Image: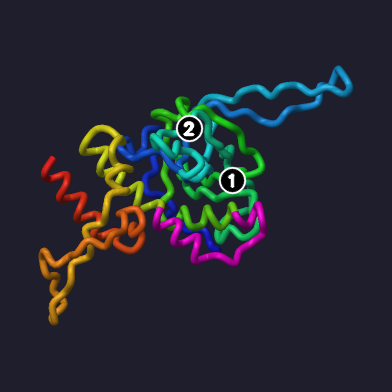
């Protein structure tokens, strides 16, 4: 799968990108504590040295944990720690269409117009509190789809589920888009997931000329979460109506 040339929903050279957008998979952070692999002690055989914590403007990382694993099922708050892949400048002589090297996730023009890559073979646990105010980029739907493909190819060499990557990228993007609107309006992320689990009001019918018949929708018995991918526009209208009343 070719990595998109414009994979970002938001991108800034310095934080903070998307201040109302909930933190999620595919976000890029700067100046966060990153821990590398343990190293052999050169002075004492058979022992290893603890890695130093890297911090500062060159300590960049890509959030790779799926929301189902990075948020509590009860509170929907981020877990205490999440998995972050180290981000470095792109190796020389590698670029579009970004073929091979599946342990690298391309991040074209990430900072100062320069290409970077996330290294899937250098992943560490980072406290979520260290991510606050440090985001410089969020992947868009196409960027997420390509990220899912890279994660699968690097771990499994299994490219045969492109439809799943696309659908999951849409589902995650749509959810975070709506959640961002909620957070911007209410100044909190709280309450949105409960709203998403409420019944979907239904899709309105159209007349013979293709015009939407207002008030023709019927409850389907399914939750908004279940129809998110297929009825994103209708859910957007429902959210607009709710925000207008509140």
- The verdict on residue 98 being magenta is no
Which numbered disc flags the more N-terminal residue, 2 or 1? 2
Q: Nearer the viewer, residue 173 or 238?
A: 238
Q: Is 222 situated left or right of 237 in this image?
A: right
Going 58% across and 39% down the picture, which residue do you hit? 85
> What residue appears at the point 34 percent right and 40 percent down from the top-left corner?
21
Tell me: 203 left or right of 15: left
Residue named by callout 2: 79
Whether residue 223 is visible, yes or no, is: yes
Residue 168: give its label: none
The residue mark sitting in front, 2 or 1, is 2
Specify the farthest residue to the top.
Answer: 43
> How would you classify the magenta stretch by its main secondary structure?
helix
Residue drawn at point x = 23 percent, y = 60 percent: 234
**Figure quadrant of the N terminus:** bottom right
Q: Residue furthest front?
A: 221
| Residue located farthest toward the bottom when viewing the structure as drawn | 208
Q: Position of residue 143 (x, y in %)?
A: 46, 54
Q: Is residue 13 visible?
A: no
Q: Quadrant of the C terminus?
A: top left
In percent of width and height, residue 37 lies at 70, 31
- Whether residue 138 is situated above or below residue 219 in the rendered picture: above
Callout 1: SS:
loop
Within 10 Å of the Cα at label 1, are there few (<14), some (14-19), or many (20+) other Cα atoms? some
Q: Is residue 86 above or below residue 201?
A: above
> Residue, x 12% and y 45% (percent of image)?
244
Tell me, for residue 90, which label it has, or none: 1
Give the Cα separation between the discs numbered 2 and 1.
30 Å
Looking at the rendering, the stretch of residues picked out in magenta corresponds to: 152-171
Q: Position of residue 32 (x, y in %)?
A: 51, 28
State the colouring used for the structure image. Answer: rainbow
Mark 2 secondary-structure assignment: loop
């Amino acid at each position: 799968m070719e990595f998109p040339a414009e994979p970002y929903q938001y991108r800034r050279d310095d934080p903070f990108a998307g201040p109302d957008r909930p933190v999620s998979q595919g976000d890029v952070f700067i100046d966060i504590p990153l821990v590398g692999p343990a190293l052999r002690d050169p002075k004492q055989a058979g022992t290893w040295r603890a890695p130093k914590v890297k911090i500062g403007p060159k300590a960049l990382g890509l959030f790779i944990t799926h929301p189902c694993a990075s948020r509590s099922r009860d509170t929907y708050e981020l877990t205490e720690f999440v998995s972050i892949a180290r981000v470095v400048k792109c190796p020389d002589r590698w670029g579009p269409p970004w073929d091979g090297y599946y342990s690298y996730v391309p991040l074209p023009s990430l900072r100062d117009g320069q290409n970077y890559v996330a290294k899937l073979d250098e992943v560490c646990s980072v406290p979520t509190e260290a991510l606050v105010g440090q985001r410089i980029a969020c992947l868009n739907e196409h960027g997420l789809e390509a990220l899912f493909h890279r994660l699968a190819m690097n771990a499994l060499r299994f490219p045969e589920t492109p439809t799943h990557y696309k659908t999951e990228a849409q589902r995650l993007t749509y959810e975070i888009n709506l959640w961002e609107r909620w957070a911007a309006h209410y100044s909190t992320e709280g309450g949105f997931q409960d709203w998403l689990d409420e019944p979907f009001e239904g899709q309105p019918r159209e007349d013979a000329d293709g015009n939407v018949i207002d008030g023709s929708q019927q409850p389907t018995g399914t939750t908004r979460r279940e129809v998110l991918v297929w009825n994103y526009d209708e859910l957007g209208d429902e959210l607009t109506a709710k925000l207008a009343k509140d």
